[in-house]
Amino acid sequence: MKPKRILMAKTGLDGHWRGPTIVARALRDAGFEVIMIGMATTAEIVAAAIDEDVDLVGLNIGGHIDVALRAVDAVQSAAPDMPIFAGGTIPPHACKQLEAKGLEVFPPGSMLTDIVDSANRLTGLSTAQ
């Protein structure tokens, strides 16, 4: 079976790479193919998700919730069945906004095992709830 593909993108231009890099490595170690596009515009995220035929979109949000919400809306419009999860420096009110849009959200301090479990669940590799 070919590995599930995850697109990882940053919605902010903050330049912080440690978190997304660690998450990408954990996902790769778990057997996923990870496509890192780094800092990207909403249009670039949507285009990459479609062009790369990914199974899941992961967004790193550097506190810029308005930009992230535009990206989420655009992905959900272009690919309504595409699961999305988000992590990074996300204020509590923004976590609630993202969760209301159907995202699983991982603010600072989240466990890598929880992120990998979420990726497995969202891509259909696990049915555990």
Image (cartoon, rainbow, N blue to C red):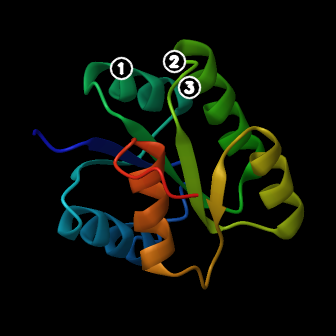
Residue type (three-letter) at the residue carrying disc 3: Val
Residue farthest along the front direction in this orientation: 128
Give x and y (percent) for residue 85.
56, 50
Q: Are marks 1 and 2 in contact (CB under 8 Å)?
A: yes
Which residue is tagged 1? 50
Q: Quadrant of the N terminus?
A: top left
Q: Quadrant of the C terminus?
A: bottom right
Question: Residue at left 42%, top 28%?
Answer: 44
Q: Eyeballing the image, is 91 above or below 95?
A: below
Q: CA distance from mark 1 to mark 2?
A: 8 Å
Which residue is tagged 2? 79
Question: Residue at left 77%, top 43%?
Answer: 66
Give x and y (percent) for residue 36.
29, 50
Q: Is residue 125 visible?
A: yes
Residue 10: mark: none
Left or right: residue 22 versus residue 115 is left
